[in-house]
Structures are given as structure tokens and as C-alpha cells.
């Protein structure tokens, strides 16, 4: 990348390059990301278990892959499941529910069509995660939206390298660098869930545990918390400044409700 311009991907035709360069930005389907889905942005969804991270990823997925007639962007999505918890039935139900809310007529067909644009890779280790990221980097044409659930899934399992300068990077560090290359070279939008492992001092507090290399990649963070049995809240903003915005939402069997 030079001066914020897109670079020509390996073996990319002039037609594909122009289509990618001129493509209109799409909404990511939730209030905090609706107006500024800049290409090459890394977004983090941070929160404890049952705080709505996967539900928001499903909402984002539906908003990206559904056809225009049902509120979507008609674009490709790659979901990298590092937790092994994504059920195909939940993915189908969430996409159908989003389509039906936009236009009930033809929602079933729209959802079936959208699913053809979603690829799911189940990653059981950092090595498999790294291989999946490298495979995505070699896809032809416009980079897909990349959803990761979750980015911290393997961090604690690794034996960390020695502190000396000559130590080889860990597999997790290699994964972070692969994410950075997808962001900078392919201008992919990457949304990652990150679990919270520490007790917060206040509602929605964020405590970093991943390496600084990851922290520097994140351009926007949503800090999630459950405030009642059926209501969740998200604070969002620039991780380097503050979390000045917020919104609340509900989660039902078919995805996010009532933003």
C-alpha cells in the first residue's frame, strides 16, 4: 500500500482491480459500524461469554452476503471458527431472519443464495488458523469480509518464545502478521471476536492480554457486556482514545434484535 491506495494483487486482472477499487463501501449491519466500514479495517468485539459476540458476527455476516433486495451487500464472507462452536443451522437461521426482516417475500430463496457466498473454515490450532489466513490471502478478486471467532482462542495454549531478540515468532504472532497483511495489502475488512478472561472494574472495561502487535492493528473496538437477561450493551470507539459511543441490543434465537 502506498498513500492509502490499493495495490494490485498477484495475478489480478485490470477488471478485477477496478471492480475492487470502485466498489462502494457496505454497512456492516450494526450501529457502531454502519457508516465507516473502511477497507482494510480491523475491528474487535470484546466481551465475556454470552455477551453477544457471535450474535453480532452473525448479524454482520448476513448484512454482507445477502442480496441487495434483502438488505445485504451480495458479497463474499469467510468465517474462521477457532472455537468450533458455529453450527450451520444457526448460521442459516440468522441469515434467513435478517432477510425476512428486510423483506419477507422471497426471504427463503435470498437466504439460500446468500449461503453460497459464505465459506466456513474450522481451525483447531494456531497452525490451521495461519494456513486458513494464508489461503484467504490468495483468493482472487475482491477480498472477502473475514470474520474470526475468536482471535484469542489459541493464545494461551502456546509455549511463548524466549525473550531474546533472535527468538522465532510464535505461531500466534505469525497469525497476527497474516491478519495485518490481509488488512494492508488486500484491504480486507476483518472483524474478530475476542473473549474476556479478566474481571472488569466497571461495566464494559477492556483489559488487553494479547501482544502489542495485535493492539496496534485494531482500529475500532466494541466492548460488550450483558446488563440483563435479555439486554446487552456495547461501548465503541477508537481503542487509542476512548469509547465515546454506545448502543444496546437484544439477542434472540434468530440473531440480534432491536438495536
Image: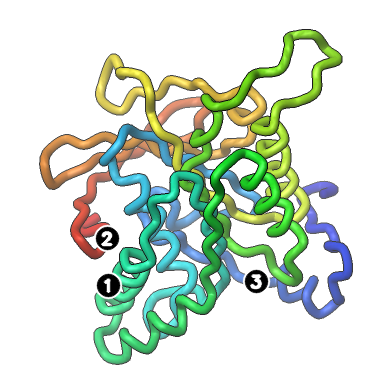
CA neighbours of label 2 inside 10 A, class few (<14), some (14 to 19), many (20+): many
* Residue picked out by circle 1: 97
Name the quadrant of the C terminus. Answer: bottom left
Q: Is residue 135 left or right of residue 257?
A: right
The residues tagged by marks 3 and 1 sit, at their Cα atoms, a distance apart of 26 Å
- Mark in front: 3 vs 1: 1
The residue tagged 3 is: 23
The answer to whether marks 1 and 2 mark residues whose Cβ atoms lie closer than 8 Å is yes
Colouring method of the image: rainbow
Question: Which of pointers 2 and 3 lies earlier in the amino acid sequence?
Answer: 3
Measure the alpha-carbon separation of dots 2 and 3.
28 Å
Residue 198 on image: x %, y %: 36, 19
**Residue at 25% in and 25% down:** 203
Q: Is residue 131 above or below residue 216?
A: below
Which one is earlier in the sequence, the residue at label 3 or at label 1?
3
**Element assignment for label 2:** strand
Image vertical order of residue 138 relative to residue 82, above or below: below
Q: How far across and down, in percent of the image, does residue 184 sit? A: 74, 47
Say left or right for 26 vs 60: right
Choose top left, top right, bottom left or bottom right for residue 219. Answer: top right
Find residue 196 and report its image quarter.
top left
Q: Nearer the viewer, mark 2 or mark 3?
A: 2
Q: Secondary structure at mark 1?
A: helix
Element at label 3: loop
Q: Which residue is mark 2?
A: 255
Q: Which mark is residue 50?
A: none
Amino acid at each position: 500500500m502506498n498513500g492509502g491506495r490499493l495495490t494490485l494483487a498477484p495475478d489480478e486482472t485490470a477488471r478485477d482491480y477496478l471492480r475492487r477499487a470502485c466498489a462502494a463501501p457496505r454497512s456492516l449491519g450494526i450501529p457502531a459500524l454502519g457508516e465507516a466500514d473502511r477497507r482494510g479495517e480491523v475491528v474487535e468485539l470484546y466481551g465475556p461469554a454470552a455477551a453477544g459476540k457471535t450474535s453480532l458476527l452473525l448479524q454482520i455476516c448476513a448484512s454482507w452476503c445477502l442480496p441487495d433486495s434483502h438488505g445485504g451487500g451480495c458479497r463474499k464472507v469467510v468465517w474462521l471458527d477457532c472455537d468450533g462452536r458455529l453450527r450451520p443451522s444457526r448460521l442459516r437461521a440468522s441469515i434467513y431472519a435478517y432477510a425476512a426482516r428486510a423483506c419477507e417475500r422471497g426471504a427463503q430463496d435470498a437466504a439460500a443464495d446468500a449461503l453460497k457466498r459464505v465459506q466456513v473454515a474450522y481451525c483447531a490450532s494456531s497452525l490451521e488458523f495461519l494456513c486458513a489466513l494464508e489461503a484467504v490471502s490468495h483468493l482472487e478478486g475482491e477480498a472477502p469480509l473475514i470474520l474470526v471467532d475468536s482471535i484469542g482462542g489459541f493464545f494461551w495454549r502456546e509455549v511463548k518464545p524466549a525473550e531474546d531478540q533472535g527468538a522465532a515468532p510464535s505461531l500466534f504472532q505469525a497469525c497476527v502478521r497474516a491478519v495485518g497483511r490481509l488488512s494492508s495489502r488486500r484491504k480486507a475488512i476483518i472483524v474478530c471476536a475476542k473473549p474476556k478472561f479478566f474481571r472488569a472494574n466497571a461495566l464494559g472495561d477492556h483489559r488487553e492480554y494479547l501482544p502489542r502487535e495485535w493492539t496496534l492493528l485494531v482500529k475500532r473496538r466494541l466492548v460488550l457486556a450483558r446488563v440483563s437477561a435479555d439486554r446487552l450493551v456495547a461501548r465503541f470507539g477508537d481503542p487509542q482514545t476512548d469509547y465515546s459511543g454506545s448502543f444496546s441490543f437484544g439477542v434472540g434465537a434468530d440473531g440480534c434484535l432491536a438495536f
